[in-house]
Image: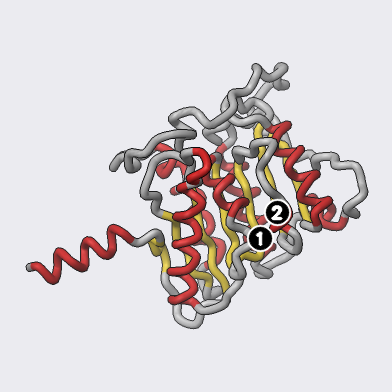
Amino acid sequence: MRAIAARRDQTASSALVPLRAVEAPRGAVLLLHGGRADALEPPPVVNLPAVRMRPFARSLARATVGHAIALGRVRYVHRGWNGERADAARDATRALEELSRVTGPVPVVLVGHSMGGRAALRVAGHPLVSAVVGLAPWCPADEPVDHLAGRRVVLLHGDRDRVTDPADTWALAARARTAGSEVCTLPVSGGDHAMLRGAAAWHALTTAAVTGLLGLGPLPGRVAEGFAAPAAAPHVPAQAPELPGTAPAQAPEPPGTAPEPTA
């Protein structure tokens, strides 16, 4: 009984939650959900930010079946980013190290939402990481970008987001491109922070980007065009399709400085 309890404790302390293990993997995808700006308590058992990533996991699993792509998600010790502690980024780094011991040196695409998007961008300099897909990411003006040189970055952001500001995302993209990253930004017309409006479009755009980044198929045209833009070119977000059933977006409200509790 003690041995079983010890194994459970070890599993619970792991930052990597495997969603699909494969033999001789040729690549991997890690999902990172959102959280809070400041919160030292652990994520709750019923955690809406984690639930929001489940449809993305299912879509990616279907699209990569039979291609020897491992899937997993990052388990956070704390619910929040917590200032200079950057707890979500620390957990993401631990998950990558644990993944490397399982898969070896395979290319990894990180897919992060909100706080998870910030964590994915922060750890993208890890040797395993080849690309990042950020969904409504939290991108403060002082977020570092130099380590994104040589990485591919795709950023999606809804123009109805009232939690994180798409303008901050486009600004980070411009800085990352100058630093030497291949960057594509996709505004989601009518999209909200929770990615509930036009959810199918969010899932489809993300899945197409990830499979292209893994080399399982061609990159979406708008992504390829974004990557091809020279570093000195003015940054203009590529226009993603308007989500069905949405009216033209109104001027955004003044954004907060960090994700809301449900980010």
Residue drawn at (46%, 39%) of the image: 82
Which one is in front, 158 or 119? 119
Binning the other alpha carbons within 10 Å of mark 1 as few (below 14), some (14 to 19) or many (20 upward) gives many
Quick check: 11 left or right of 216?
Answer: left
Q: In the rendered structure, which disc, 1 or 2, sits on the residue that comes first in sequence?
A: 1
- Residue 136 in view (yes/no): no
Q: Is residue 248 left or right of residue 256?
A: right
Left/right placement of residue 48 relative to residue 3 reads: right
Badge 1 is on which residue?
A: 131
Tell me the amino acid under the disc marked 2: Val
Question: Quick check: 154 left or right of 21?
Answer: right
Which residue corresponds to the image point at 55% horizontal and 49% vertical from the top-left? Answer: 119
Q: Which numbered tag is attached to residue 153? A: 2
User: Relative to 108, does residue 133 appear above or below in the rendering?
Assistant: above
Q: Residue furthest left?
A: 1
Q: Position of residue 259 (x, y in %)?
A: 53, 31
Q: Which mark is residue 156?
A: none
Q: CA distance from mark 1 to mark 2?
A: 6 Å
Q: Examine the image and state in which quarter residue 147 appears.
A: bottom right
Q: Is residue 61 visible?
A: yes
Are circles 1 and 2 on residues that touch, CB within 8 Å? yes
Q: How is the image coloured?
A: secondary structure
Residue at x 39%, y 40% (from the top left corner): 79
Residue 123 x/y as whole percent: 58, 57
Residue 7 image position (x, y, % from top left): 21, 68
Q: Amino acid at mark 1?
A: Ala
Disc 2 is placed on an element classified as strand
**Residue found 69% across the figure and 67% down from its top:** 217
